[in-house]
Amino acid sequence: MRIMSRWSLAVTITLVSWLVGNAYAVPSVTFNESPEPIGQLDCADRLNDVLNLTVSANNDQTTDSYVLELVVFTEGNTSCLSTLQECPQITADDEGICGCLESRDGSPTSFVWSGALASLSADFEEVLCAGSTVLSFRADINYIDTAIESETSEVVTLETQLDAPPAPVNPPVVRGAESALVISLDASDRSVANVDRHEVCVRRVSSSATDDDGNTDTETDSAGSLADLRAGFSTCKETTQLKSGDYRYEGLENDVSYEIIVAAYDTAGNRSPNSEIVRATPASLFDFAELYHSRLNGAEGESGGCSTSMGSHHQSTLVWLFGILLVLGRRRATS
């Protein structure tokens, strides 16, 4: 077995001691609360949200002085960071966004940056809200008066997702119920990628709301507001139930005709164009079978309720008559 000489042992101990005493700092940056993706409808407003990021060197052993910086940039636009002359300094132009938000001298140190993107540059809205973008934040350590190379952290990101999901391909299926409408979607429209929830809008049928054919083109390719997307429908409710089953829209008047549209939302709050308009009429309960489904299984989104079609009316009547005959037959059997 080879035995290490005293000289080799001394050199090894000295080297290890030097490495420990001069351990490199490792920068990091984290959101105190991770931001949700920003959508088209609320992009300008969300840029006024206050962000809080913690920048740290994550090491208390280094003896070399350095500057710890928080930098920001859009995807593919990091080259401009090397040309920045001071901090803070932000550029926002056709190439994207690039800049330094804050710097601190330290050995080691950490700091929290707090601010809204809209306050950094008047051009942020134009850059971030013009298309889907990934805005990255990174911590850099630049050592002073040493040959040690700069260190950069992993990035944390804030995304603008401005591409709306598609409108439902098929018209919603709607049937009347007691003071309500029961809505469902075709199976192909239930599991569309990136759809987080749906919005159901209703309105009373009126000549001012429809054209001569009783139909309105509700799709909007590039909406400037939520009102534009809703195309005249102002009474709307959001639900996740249409992703898997029926949704019961309550609080309507019986024997009044309504128009119904359905739209999809993604996780960023982008709203799709509207589905085709469908008409239906809430109606009073009229048989035992429907009363059972509506009252005993009366959870929101139930499938009970009057149908607006004659076929369903006859089916419900037959169920009612069968129930009466069944009761009478049991009474005779026990008498």
Image: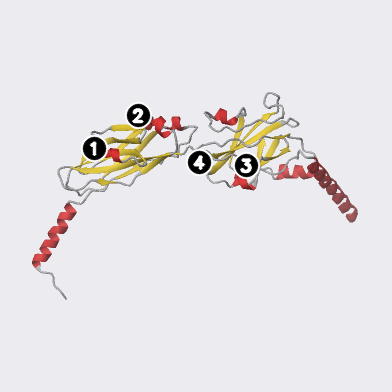
| Contact (Cβ within 8 Å) of mark 1 with mark 2 | no
Where is mark 2, residue-wise?
Answer: 121
CA–CA distance in space, label 3 to label 1: 55 Å
| Contact (Cβ within 8 Å) of mark 3 with mark 1 | no
Secondary structure at numbered mark 3? loop
Report the amino acid beneath label 1. Answer: Arg
Task: Identify which residue is drawn at 26% across, 48% down.
Answer: 26
Marked residue nearer the N-terminal end (1 or 2)? 1
Label 2 or label 4, whichever lies nearer to me, is 2
Marked residue nearer the N-terminal end (3 or 1)? 1
Left or right placement of residue 241 versus residue 88 in this view: right
Label 1 or label 2, whichever lies nearer to me, is 2
Where is mark 3, residue-wise?
Answer: 169
Report the amino acid beneath label 2. Answer: Ser
Which quadrant of the figure has residue 183? top right
Residue 74: image x %, image y %?
36, 39
In the rendered image, which quarter contains the N terminus?
A: bottom left
Where is mark 4, residue-wise?
Answer: 267
